[in-house]
């Protein structure tokens, strides 16, 4: 059995996905074996102080050591570990990467927004898109939002913006960044008719589950607005008890809703499809693309 691993060091959580790779008639595919999510909230340090604190750095080091041990036990043959906006902004990001390498022998890569977007698009969700529609692909993270416009299944424009859930909670989102995003979205969608949204990330997945929509059906603007109003009318504690949300999801889900609702208003998008894929899935798909052309399947 061929096994690959993906590590995503995000601004809100750190994830490890171990996937079993199998051969099909049309190429290679993967099945999720183990997925672990640790809510480290590196963004709180990075966006407020531009520095990862000693305590969080220690927690990250321990998490990476645990991930490395699991990867060894599962006999993972290939992996890719990526850190996004929190580590990009922390002045001690590179120093931490070096320390993790010394202690765990894991190679970590701090990636730019465009590379992050490209990894997410390795999921090839465009293969299932309707040719008659244009799409705005929205990936909302803790530190940034990656946007892409797809026309006839082809990405025609993409950009990363420093607007994310943790950044908003910490009041570190800037008005001019929102304005840049508004102008970019308007410019790149104004000539398109029949635009739908595609949403990825933990928050939109959770919102989709909460909506009780059938698998494969889109989440409508009205349903999303209604969920947002319900969530926003409750305290943090009530969100946890009423909706059964994890504490580290119950706060970020509000700004996530705000990002989606704002983008949908700007573009007139009435529905968002939620394919339930994210950064770690993209990393596995990228590893398959990069390695299996030359690797011998056992």
Image: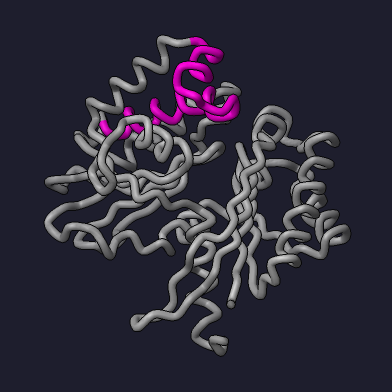
Residue at the image point whose x is 49% and y is 56% from the top: 114
Q: Is residue 42 visible from the viewing direction of this image?
A: no
In the rendered image, which quarter contains the C terminus? Answer: bottom right
Residue at the image point whose x is 53% and y is 62% from the top: 283
Residue at the image point whose x is 41% and y is 46% from the top: 200
Q: Which quarter of the picture shows residue 98?
A: bottom right
Q: Of residues 33 and 185, which is closer to you in this image?
A: 33
User: Is 246 a magenta residue?
Assistant: yes
User: Is 220 a magenta residue?
Assistant: no
Across and down, in percent, residue 173 comes to 52, 28
Residue at the image point whose x is 71% and y is 64% from the top: 71
The vertical placement of 206 against 3, above or below, is: above
Q: Which quarter of the picture shows residue 227?
A: top left
| Main secondary structure type of the part rendered in magenta | helix
Q: Which residues are magenta?
A: 235-264
The vertical placement of 289 against 64, above or below, is: below
Across and down, in percent, residue 146 comes to 44, 46
Q: Of residues 231 and 149, which is closer to you in this image?
A: 231
Q: Of residues 172 and 196, which is closer to you in this image?
A: 196
Across and down, in percent, residue 85 comes to 60, 44
The vertical placement of 296 against 278, above or below, is: below
């Amino acid at each position: 059995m061929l096994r690959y691993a993906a590590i995503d060091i995000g601004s809100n959580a750190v994830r490890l996905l171990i996937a079993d790779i199998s051969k099909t008639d049309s190429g290679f595919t993967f099945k999720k074996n183990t997925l672990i999510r640790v809510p480290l909230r590196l963004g709180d340090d990075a966006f407020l102080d531009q520095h990862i604190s000693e305590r969080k750095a220690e927690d990250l080091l321990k998490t990476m050591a645990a991930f490395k041990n699991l990867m060894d036990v599962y006999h993972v043959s290939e992996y890719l570990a990526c850190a996004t906006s929190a580590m990009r902004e922390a002045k001690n990001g590179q120093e931490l990467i070096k320390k993790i390498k010394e202690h765990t022998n894991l190679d970590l890569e701090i990636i730019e927004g465009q590379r992050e977007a490209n990894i997410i698009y390795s999921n090839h969700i465009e293969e299932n898109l309707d040719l008659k529609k244009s799409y705005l692909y929205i990936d909302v993270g803790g530190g940034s939002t990656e946007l892409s416009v797809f026309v006839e299944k082809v990405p025609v424009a993409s950009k990363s913006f420093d607007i994310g859930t943790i950044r908003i909670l910490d009041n570190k989102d800037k008005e001019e960044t929102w304005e840049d995003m508004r102008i970019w979205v308007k410019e790149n969608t104004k000539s398109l008719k029949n635009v739908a949204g595609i949403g990825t990330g933990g928050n939109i997945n959770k919102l989709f589950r909460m909506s009780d929509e059938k698998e494969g059906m889109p989440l409508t603007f009205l349903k999303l607005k209604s969920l947002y109003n319900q969530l926003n009318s409750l305290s943090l504690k009530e969100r946890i008890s009423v909706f059964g949300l994890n504490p580290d999801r119950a706060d970020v889900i509000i700004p996530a809703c705000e990002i989606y609702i704002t983008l949908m208003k700007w573009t007139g998008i009435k529905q968002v499809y939620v394919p339930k894929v994210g950064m770690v899935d993209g990393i596995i798909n990228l590893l398959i693309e990069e390695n299996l052309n030359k690797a011998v399947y056992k």
